[in-house]
Image: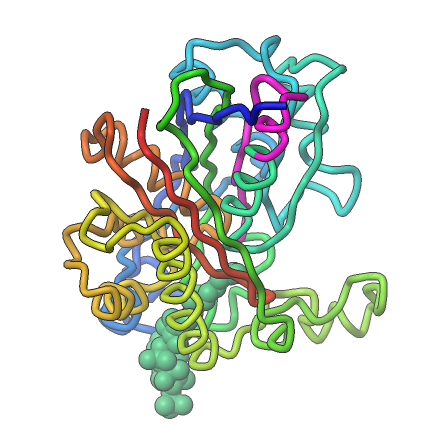
Amino acid sequence: MPMNQCVILGTGSYAPPRVVTNEELAKTIDTSPEWIYTRSGIRERHLTSPGENTSDMAVHAARAALADAKLTPADIDLLVVATLTPDLPMPAVACQVQHKLGVPTHAACFDLNAACSGFIYALDTASAMIQSGRYKHALVIGAEKLSAIVDWSDRATCVLFGDGSGAVVLSRTTKPGFGIVGTKLGAYGDSTDLLCIPKGGSSCPATAASIAAGDHFLKMKGKEVFKLAVRAMDEAARDILEQHHVKADQIALVIPHQANVRIIEAVSQYLELPMDRFYVNLDRYGNTSSASVPIALDEARRGGRIKHGDLILLVAFGAGLTYGSALIRWN
Ligand code: ACO
């Protein structure tokens, strides 16, 4: 059976209206706006207000992507949400999003957790399902309410994260040469302890003691994550370029995971590709994990940074430590 080509027909994103600046954080946390900006590149982040959840943010981004693709929820037969902060441990937040959006009950709906690489993992999965010929139109969403899992008394982590969502609509196309050219995924499973939530899973369900100790919050060994992140991003980018016989300077725009501008600068040096070919918006969002790449992709496209025929590289790393890259010829 001939393989179908898969294209991104539409993009969308959403950030909660509440903006919290470094200056505001410095009023309640032992930090300074300069420390946060010089160590990470972050100036502000969007945070949800009480009552706003991952599913709500996912729905906003999905609606924008559907409108952009000129499709309706009724057209969708596959819905994947990349997230590490679903509304509930179960069921999958994808099912809540399906219901809120009005996606038909015959659609396949599931969550995928590869932390900050989650969107690229979901893109790979959904595009393969579309290429198989068994699905027509997929919604792939990255949505995170990280404000709910960071320890607001841990200055080494809480200043880095934000909330938000991004989405794409994937569809089959008969136009050869456009769409998802290839993907590369991987993980360093020997480094799970560098970035994790130590308790609250099935191996150690939450207890009063674990909650009192703050063990259901995100813990990170920042310096070690930084080093491995640079290696993982560089390898993920290099591997996919080699695999498809593409030179770095053929890439019109890199959409990297927005964790720390110093990580992006290091990757730019390793690839010998100037920083103006990297889309950076982490100054306004912080790290939104699996939402970071689709938010940046949507902004870049709507801002005129991506044109028909451009070769775009997505690259990310996240807890696990997972990594992933995707090469797209923009349609
Ligand atoms: N304000 C002021 N001082 C602080 C703060 C803060 N918010 N946080 C830490 N410090 C202090 C530390 O206590 C330390 O003090 P000490 O030297 O007296 O012990 C000092 O600042 C320096 O800390 P470093 O760890 O050396 O700072 P570094 O330059 O490594 O930057 C950072 C820290 C920003 C966390 C960096 O290591 C980083 O970005 N790491 C990668 C993070 C990342 O990408 N995470 C990905 C998450 S992806 C996912 O899947 C969720």
In the figure, 288 relative to 132: above or below? below
Q: Quadrant of the C terminus?
A: top left
Q: Quadrant of residue 27?
A: bottom left
Colour scheme of the rendered structure: rainbow
Q: Position of residue 44 (x, y in %)?
A: 31, 53
Q: Position of residue 290 (x, y in %)?
A: 50, 48
In the figure, 68 relative to 151: above or below? above
Left or right of residue 33, residue 317 in this image: right
In the figure, 274 relative to 48: above or below? below
Residue at figure coordinates x 38%, y 60% from the top left = 259
Q: Quadrant of residue 104?
A: top right
Q: Position of residue 99 (x, y in %)?
A: 69, 19
Residue 30 painted magenta: no
Left or right of residue 40, residue 150 in this image: right
Q: Quadrant of residue 1?
A: top right
Q: Position of residue 166 (x, y in %)?
A: 45, 35
Q: Nearer the viewer, residue 296 or 286?
A: 296
Q: Nearer the viewer, residue 266 or 63?
A: 266
Q: Residue furthest front?
A: 1
Residue at figure coordinates x 39%, y 18% from the top left = 175
Residue at figure coordinates x 43%, y 60% from the top left = 236
Is any part of residue 30 visible from this angle? no
Residue at figure coordinates x 58%, y 65% from the top left = 187
Image quarter where ligand 1 lies:
bottom left
Q: Magenta span covers which residues?
A: 128-146
Q: Nearer the viewer, residue 87 or 295?
A: 295
